[in-house]
Amino acid sequence: MAKKTRSTQTSKGERRNVSKFNCTSETVDVIERQIRQRASWKRGRNVVLTIENPNKNETNKRFIKVNAKDVWGEHRHQKIYTMTGTAGG
């Protein structure tokens, strides 16, 4: 069997080369993910966040993964505010 080359063939662009599912990204999904990450962090789970790399010299690593404890701190040290007192005026 002869080896085929694409030197003379050009794509007509008739069909998608990636799945439509992978191209759809809604902001609702991003917000829901952040809410779930925050809730897991409050429960003391090991949460990993993806943030932009602060070292701009590392151009091959645009984003890095860091532990949520390093970014948000320990979950036990966060103050929980509750409403106390009587309602009304």
Image: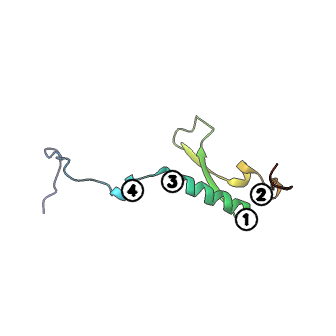
Amino acid type, mark 2: His
- In depth, the one of 54 and 38 nearer the eye is 38
Q: Secondary structure at mark 4?
A: helix
Foreground label between 4 and 3 = 3
Number of the label disc, if any, that sits on residue 28: 3
Which residue is at 49% across, 50% downward?
27
Foreground label between 1 and 4 = 1
Q: Secondary structure at mark 3?
A: helix
Q: Position of residue 4 (x, y in %)?
A: 16, 55
Q: Position of residue 67 (x, y in %)?
A: 68, 54
Q: Earlier in the sequence, mark 2 or mark 1?
A: 1
- Measure the alpha-carbon separation of dots 2 and 1: 8 Å
Residue that label 2 marks: 75
Q: Are marks 4 and 3 in contact (CB under 8 Å)?
A: no
Number of the label disc, if any, that sits on residue 58: none
Q: Quadrant of the N terminus?
A: bottom left
Amino acid type, mark 4: Asn
Q: Is residue 37 left or right of residue 76?
A: left
Amino acid type, mark 1: Arg
Q: Are marks 2 and 1 in contact (CB under 8 Å)?
A: yes
Q: Position of residue 32 (x, y in %)?
A: 56, 57
Residue that label 1 marks: 43
Foreground label between 2 and 3 = 3
Residue that label 4 marks: 22
Q: Earlier in the sequence, mark 1 or mark 3?
A: 3
Amino acid type, mark 3: Val
- Measure the alpha-carbon separation of dots 4 and 3: 15 Å
